[in-house]
Image (cartoon, coloured by chain):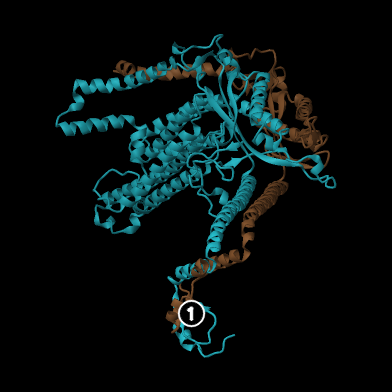
Amino acid sequence: MSDKRPLWLAVFAFGIAILLGIGTYALGHHIAESRVIVTAIMPLTLAALFAFVAWWHGLLVRRENVEQEDKNRLSREYDREDLFGDADATLNLAADAHKHFDRYFLTSLTILTGIFLLVRVIFYWAGWMEAEIQDRNALQAAGLSFFMLIFCLLAGTFYNGASREPGCRFLRPVGNWFLLAAFIYALAFFAMLAERFNIGQWDSGVARIILVLIGILAIEMIFNFIIEFYRPRILGEAERPLYESRILGVITEPGGIAKNVAHALDYQFGFKVSETWFYSFLERAVVPFVVLLLFTLYLLDCFILIDYNQMGIRETFGAPAAKPLQPGLHLKLPVPIQRIYTFPVGDVTALSVGYEAYAPGERPEPNPEVPEEQMDSTGGRVLLWNKHHFKDETRFLVPAQRDDSEADESDSRSVPVSFLSANIFIHYKIDPDNLYAFAYNYTNTPDALRQIMWRETVAFLARQDFIALLSSNYQNAQRELDERIRQAVDDADPELGIIVLNVGIGGVHPPVEVAGDFQAVVGADIERHTRTLAAEGQSARTLAMARAQRVSSITEAEAYRNTKSMLASSEAQRFESQLLAYRASGPVFMLRSYLDMLESISSRSRKFVVSAPNSQHIQIFDFTEKVRPDLQNVDLNAPDN
Amino acid sequence: MAEKKRVNHWPVMLLIALFAIIFLISLVSFQVRTTEIAVLTRLGSPIAERDTSPGWHFRLPWPIEDVWKHDRRIQIFEGQTGVYEEIYTRDQKNIIINVYAYWKVDPDNAITYMNKIGNREHAENQLNSILSHVKREVISQYNFNDLIATVRQAAEDGSVVIQDTVKLTDVEKRMNDMLRVAVQEYGIVISNVGIKHIGLPESVTQKVIARMQEDRRKIAEKTLAEGDAQAQIIQTQAQAEASNIINEGQSQATHIRAEADAKAAEYYAAFAENPDLAIFLRKLEGLRNTLEEDTTLIFDIETPPFDLFQKQAIPNLSLQSSPSTDANQ
């Protein structure tokens, strides 16, 4: 073998890597716009870099060999080994250069390459946050990927094999990175085919998986750099590039995996398991088994189970069958020949317009400074007009609650409207007799239905009396809106392919900002009633008291009349009796009467008898409070009046 | 040995062969779904006469022949930058309006669409500008009350009802007609245009809300005032009625008392036989009634019966004749 072969191989590898890299760049960024293909730029870049390093290393080795040959020749000519010993630095320039190359350049290159890869991975990852590009010729991209796959595979296989030649060890990483590029192109090929046949959008997902893999390889390089300082040096060990990835070796040399497994088993069991018939059988059967498994999985696509509440449409090469498929097990030819699309015709679906609900976990904490966001005492179980319950509520325009006579004619620019929040819902299901209309007339039939609901709601509310809608006219409004939306669905051209089950006004109320004032009106009405009732109560009390007073007055008067009459009668009778007694004995009668009276009153009174000669009449004093002191002060000698 | 290796690799070879066959077939054929509209191009030029109906079709491999596809179903467009757009009405009122349009690629003019538009994004760009223009032109020809019924009129029964002046259907029809004509040359068919939302600018919205609040407050105040007035009327009426009742009662009572006095006067005629005696007895009765307990009575000894305390009372007793004695004598 020529000693220049490793150099030429490295130069060719460099050229191939550069060409494939340019092709990949054009394909990934411009032609196919595929993220998976873009990731292949990194392994091809490293392949070019390591090819250059392999060339340089080969050059150093070649010079070292020449130098060694010169030394050997001189030693033989002068027969003195010590003359050209290692101590003479001028004769070891190439060897020293090689040593420094291994010791400093390769280690620096390894850490720098690892960091470069990691930065690129992060850069790509962060740059792919936006949506995936879907508008591309996927079939064309798949075809180009396939061709690139072939080139990369050939290059990788060739350089992996060539690296086993003497002096070509440094070409193994080049081959490995070529094979990684081939692996990426294989994934790109399948991703593009999947996209082409509408199996799914795999480009971004696969690209991210590759980024993770390359990131792991980058970390491995950095790890290699660190452990290089602590690795024990074995004299005469085979020279191996520090940046060569063991992980990548496992991926690009699958045979090595089996070999490693066999060695591990041999070691564990203590005998040559790898030479048993069973192991040999497994080794032979594993690939056919995997292929058979994949094929079986593919054939499983031929069985479609349509659930009890579903119907299906079978498409052969994209053209639908004449009749829909009923629930049950159905056979079909595999993709891309036939596809079966299922539709939940038995399910009732609900749609609403007029509000936007919070997604689960999206509802923010109430702002303590906004009363409308505070929960009521029920913790939100009671829906109140003056509390926010949704993320957003549409304010529909409705005629203002006033007539033209109240309007300010001078202000012609005023907008005599009010706002109303309404939640209109519809329950529908797919019409099984019109399934094809549902499937093929609109790109998004529920969205088309939602637009109709918005339209009819706006048109309906534009002519509704606001207050009547909230109260007395609610039932009629509900019926009218139901009819409008059903009619609009029936009139839709082309047909929507749905059956409307129910249309309703889920909620209708003034905007949250005004709701409190509406409640205040109700409160004022109740307060008015309360005040009226209080006045009526007071009135009833006043009238009752007046009636009582009237009855009391009359009763008293009647009692007076009775008493007066009876007393007068009895007094007259008694007087007649007394007159008889008086006629019989006038003075005695009078004295007795007088004494009787005196006895009756004096029994319960204090009595003082004064023996004053000049006293001619009785004086009566009321000494209820202080009798004795006054009595002691009475001047008994005072002249009588 | 070489034969054995080939046998061992047959599954992989089979797999590769399978993929290669699928790939080659896909290069020379194409599939059109029912939901798609397709145009076959040869070296970039569309071939109108080639069948591109739903199903499986053959073609020459790319780049000789290529297939352009687009969704043939109706799509909904609401606008891109101006989903909600502020527009002036004929009577100079600002409104915010959102209009949607149902559109699809014209199956008879798919090549026109492919050449002039190409894909959905470009189609929506064109629709956006055209729809914006159509909205402005049509809305500027209608008054505000053509969009929202703001006029009220008296009904036959005396109530006030909203006059239905809304012409939204006309507005939508005109928009539909204008939009359909405008996008016809792009190979686009418009099947429906509808008004999804009518609103007001935020500043006007706040004013309307403030007016609604004041309106409610006015009603609340009016209601409370009516309550106060009603309460006052009720109380005043009650007091007046109570006064009547009391006066009537007092009148009746006075009448009854007068009757009683008159009746008593009849009995008092008996006192006329001896008025002095009647007065004397009445005085006694008066004394009995007026002198209550804890009254201190001071008598002199000349007051009967305390005149018995006088020295001459006892001898005089035998000499004095009592009225009854005198009467007996």
| Residue at the top extreme, as displayed | A322
User: Residue drawn 79% across and 33% down?
Assistant: B158
Chain with brown colouring: B
- Picture layout, residue B156 above or below residue B296: above
Q: Chain of mark 1?
A: B
x then y, percent, for residue A178: 43, 35
* Residue A261 as seen in the image, left or right of residue B198: left
Is B301 in front, or is A147?
B301
Q: Position of residue B105 (x, y in %)?
A: 68, 22
Q: Nearer the viewer, residue B108 or B90?
A: B90
Q: Is the residue A576 above or below the residue A139 in the image?
A: below
Q: Residue furthest bottom?
A: A637
Q: Quadrant of residue A638?
A: bottom right
The N terminus of chain A: image quadrant: top left
Q: Which chain is cyan?
A: A
Q: Quick one: label 1, few (<14), some, or many (20+) residues within 10 Å? A: some
